[in-house]
Image: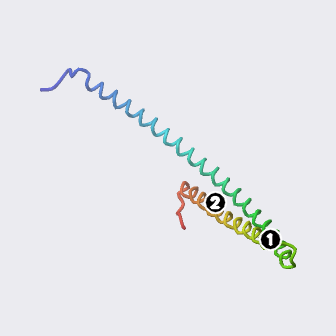
Amino acid sequence: SIPIFNGYNTKRSINQAKIQIEQNKLQLQQSEQMLIKSIQQAFYDAKAAFKQYQAAKTNVEALELSFHYTQKRYDVGLINYVDYSDALNKLNKAKSDLLNAKYEYVFRIKILDFYQGKKIDL
C-alpha cells in the first residue's frame, strides 16, 4: 500500500532536520568562538610569560652585580658570613626563578605552536 496521507510525518521530519541543522550551525559557531578565545588567551599568556622572563633576567643580572660586590666586601672582612650567605641565597633564588620563567615562556610558546599546527619538538 502507498500512503497518500501520513499525517504530515514527512513534513515534520523535514522541519526537525532543518532545526537540527541550525542547532549544529550554532554549536559550530560556539566552538569556533571558544577556540578563538583560547588562542587569544594563549597569546596573552605567552606575552605575560615573556615579560616575567625578562624581569627575572634583569633581576639575576642585578643580583649578580650585587653579589660580586658583596663577595669583595666579605673577602676583605667588611661583612660577616651571614650577610654573604644571604646574598648568595638571594642570587640562587633569582636564578631558580629565571629558570622557571624561561620554561614557563617556552611552554606558552609551544601552546601557540600547537594552535598554529606546528610540530611540537621538546
The x, y position of residue 101, in whole percent, is 66, 61
Q: Quadrant of residue 16?
A: top left
The x, y position of residue 37, in whole percent, is 57, 44
**SS for dot 2:** helix
Q: Nearer the viewer, mark 1 or mark 2?
A: 1
Label drawn at residue 85: none
Q: Is 105 drawn above or below residue 82 in the view shown? A: above
Contact (Cβ within 8 Å) of mark 1 with mark 2: no
**SS for dot 1:** helix
Callout 2 crowding tier (Cα within 10 Å): few <14, some 14–19, many ≥20: many
What residue does disc 2 label? 105
The x, y position of residue 79, in whole percent, is 84, 72
Query: Which numbered disc, 1 or 2, marks the residue that appears first in the sequence?
Result: 1
Q: Is 52 drawn above or below residue 27 in the view shown? A: below
Amino acid type at mark 1 = Phe
Amino acid type at mark 2 = Tyr
Q: How far apart, in angstroms, are the residues tagged by discs 1 and 2?
A: 27 Å
Question: 67 or 74: nearer the eye?
Answer: 74
Q: Quadrant of residue 91?
A: bottom right
